Image: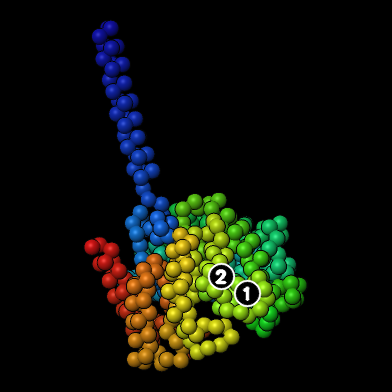
Amino acid sequence: MRHSQFFERLYMRIKITILGLFCWAACAVSYAKEPLGLTLGPGGTVLKEGQPYRGVGLNYLDCFTRTLRKNTDTSYEEGFRVLAEHHIPFVRCAFTPLSVKEMQLYQENREAYFKLMDWVVQCAERSGVGLIPSIFFAAKTMVPRLVKEHADQWGNPGSQTMAFMRQYTHEVVSRYRNSPAIWAWEFCNEYNSYADLPYAATYLPKVKDSGATEPKFPTPRDYPTHDIMIVAFREFARAVRRDDPNRLIESGADFPRKSAWHFYKEHNSTIDTPAQFEVMLSLNAIDPMDLISVHCYNDTPTKLQRKDNWERLDAAVAAARNLGKPLFVGEFQYPSEYGPDSPQARRAMDEFLAKLDRLQVPLAAVWVFDFANQEKDRNITATNQRAWELPLIRAHNEKLARSSNR
């Protein structure tokens, strides 16, 4: 009897030990698994699944908002099929509509609102296309109008604007943080473009949608400044980090204007020094943001000062390296004055893609895919006159993949 009990106890100990080893192994595999999405690597690099990554994607601005405007519109399914066919690795897209009126479904039936977003995210997952959602694409005006505040309340951590930002950010990030489709998170689109401008009122959008009530916009309280913007960027990044400790976060900022530092600090249009340019880039990616955003066009000169942004990319890359944060060219496209299928357009895109490669820019996204509102100047589809850009981007990404495997 004693021998029987001894062997029974020995058997149980061995069984428990083996089960413990299996559990330990399972935990070790779990902990060893790389975080989802894109993460920050050493020296301001981008990592995907623990390995250095570079890639060029597209802007698919309204893949979600089109189905929000018309619930039966699931044309994004065909869009993601085309993107997958051309091996487009990721897209940047809007995760809020552009107007207060289009937020009505969110306010009245949150479950239905997020079900529409779920379908888009799931479609991206099935297609193997990553998403960089701009959570508040039109935040600088839309969110304050939604909560009936002025836009200066982006600079007040205790405002209703900030409370809504934290609530919506939590709802989105916590809902999709386990999705392999999510690559990174963006705050909004080009907040810095109008910051501290003496002629800001010229460019601020007028109220057009019937959902906007009081206060009336724009007023001097609605003119953006870097002081307000910095608070908004920091608080957004902190809100994301509460639910997602790893993925890259960026602001969606445009290239700083040539006089951005002087507009901000001295209220004049003196051209910034390289050191001042670097300061303004750092403000556009204030900690805990860890990815620097610029938008890079090369059109005919306007007050937006975009003429030589392609040439300024070298300086942006150098500044990003000094700051230890990777660079994301969140929008770029050949000059709009070139014909959509012209030799000049093809040559310009070839040259800019080569420049991205030479400068080892980790991430860039062409503007814009399947966006009918810009058919005349920018839109790319599989069948229009800019369709040639899709195989061009695919070939470029394949070249990057080959070079990374050497």
Q: Nearer the viewer, residue 320 or 225?
A: 320
Please, what is the three-letter code of the amino acid marked with disc 1?
A: His
Residue at x 35%, y 35% (from the top left corner):
23
Q: Is residue 383 left or right of residue 3?
A: right
Report the residue at 54% width, 64% height from top.
282
Q: Position of residue 76 (x, y in %)?
A: 44, 73
Frontmost residue, 106 versus 207: 207
Query: Which amino acid type is marked by label 2?
Result: Gln
Do tag 2 and tag 1 residues touch (Cβ < 8 Å)? yes
Q: Position of residue 230 (x, y in %)?
A: 62, 63
Instruction: Please state the horizontal and vertical placement of residue 250, each as a whole percent of the image.
Output: 51, 64
Tell me if mark 2 has few (under 14), some (14-19) or many (20+) residues whose alpha carbon lies within 10 angstroms of its own.
some
Based on the displayed image, in which of its 4 quarters is residue 227 positioned? bottom right
Extreme residue in the left direction: 406
**Quadrant hosting residue 43:** bottom left
Q: Is residue 91 above or below residue 44?
A: below
The residue carrying mark 1 is: 262
Residue bearing mark 2: 276
Within 10 Å of disc 1 (Cα), the crowding (few <14, some 14-19, many 20+) is some
Q: Residue furthest top?
A: 2
Give the quarter of the figure containing the C terminus: bottom left
Q: Position of residue 281 (x, y in %)?
A: 53, 68
Residue 123 in the figure: left or right of residue 264: left
